[in-house]
Amino acid sequence: MDTPILGKVAFITGAGYAAGCDPKKQGEHAPNMGTAIAQKLAKMGAVVVATDINEETAKATVSTLTTYPGNPAHAFFKLDVTKKSEIEAVLAKVKETYGHIDIVCNNAGVSSMAPFEDLSEKEWDFNVDVNMKGVFLCMQAEIPYLKEHGGRIVNTCSMAAIKPDPTLAHYTASKFGVLGLTKAAAIGLAEYGITVNCVCPGWVKTPMQDREIVWEGAMKGITPEEVRQRYIDHTPLGRLCYPEDVSNAVAFFVLPESDFITGEAMNVSGGANL
């Protein structure tokens, strides 16, 4: 049994099971990245704390997780990553319950889509507040716990930070911010034995993508499935990214063997970023 992070406590944001998906009828793939990350780290032996703005979906994710003998139970919490006091309160409960926090995956994110000139201030604020400010607030609150003994931070960035899209200017800007925060923090936290890296997923097959292909299709005058086929056609490895592809990359960054890797952005896009 390969459990390289047995007993480590992993705190994950945006880890709710996709609304409308029944965890008891789980298919070949996890419904989203947060759930896939939680499942992967649990299988590697971690104690998972799944958080989401929707508490019921966080609870649903926990119901799918593997628990190893000797580990305490996994936990779930409601968490709005744009609220500093809420983040601090949840982390304090996690520390009180488990005694330590070893791995944090700042994964919560949102998206919307519009041509640059039609982009509203509301859409800008929503994307930047959740995607970038949310990561900033979480990292600030997480760092004191990781400083106690070192640890791993893995942020969810995006291919948009490598390959911008004019219909996702606000989302792109927010993910450029995540990339910058990751690299800056990696330098500042190295002396404490904390590594900071990020993953940059490509076109991931999730409920978020299901919404985005409708928006993009309407703007371009094509069907949603034609949009999805374009994603595949522009991916050299010839398929969509799956949530497990992303969780496998996260897993790499938290392995003991990856303790000399920091400040990196791993593309998980099948070559679509090239």
Image: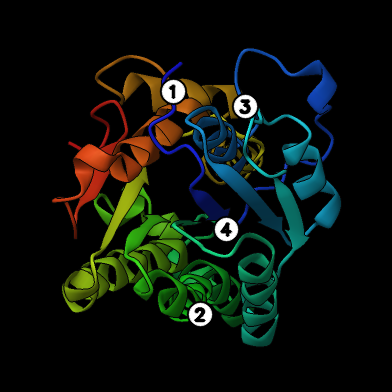
- The residue carrying mark 1 is 240
Q: Quadrant of the C terminus?
A: top left
Q: Residue furthest bottom?
A: 85
Please, is residue 206 above or below residue 171 in the view?
above
Residue 242 visible in the current orientation: no
- The residue carrying mark 2 is 141
Taking depth in this image into account, of 241 and 25 the one nearest to the observer is 25
Q: Report how far apart the C-alphas of labels 1 and 3 lie in the structure.
A: 14 Å
Q: Secondary structure at mark 1?
A: loop
Comes first in the chain, label 1 or label 2: 2
Judge left or right: residue 96 versus residue 229.
right
The disc labelled 4 sits on which kind of residue? Ala
Comes first in the chain, label 1 or label 3: 3
Residue 26 x/y as whole percent: 74, 19
Q: Report how far apart the C-alphas of labels 1 and 2 lie in the structure.
A: 34 Å
Q: Residue at x 27, y 41 (%)?
A: 256
Q: Which mark is residue 30?
A: 3
C-beta proximity under 8 Å, tags 3 and 2: no
Report the mark closest to the observer, 1 or 3.
3
Residue 231 visible in the current orientation: yes
Comes first in the chain, label 3 or label 4: 3
Please, is residue 124 above or below residue 131 in the view?
below
Please, is residue 109 above or below residue 216 in the view?
below
Comes first in the chain, label 4 or label 1: 4
The disc labelled 2 sits on which kind of residue? Ala
- The residue carrying mark 4 is 108
C-beta proximity under 8 Å, tags 4 and 2: no
The disc labelled 1 sits on which kind of residue? Leu
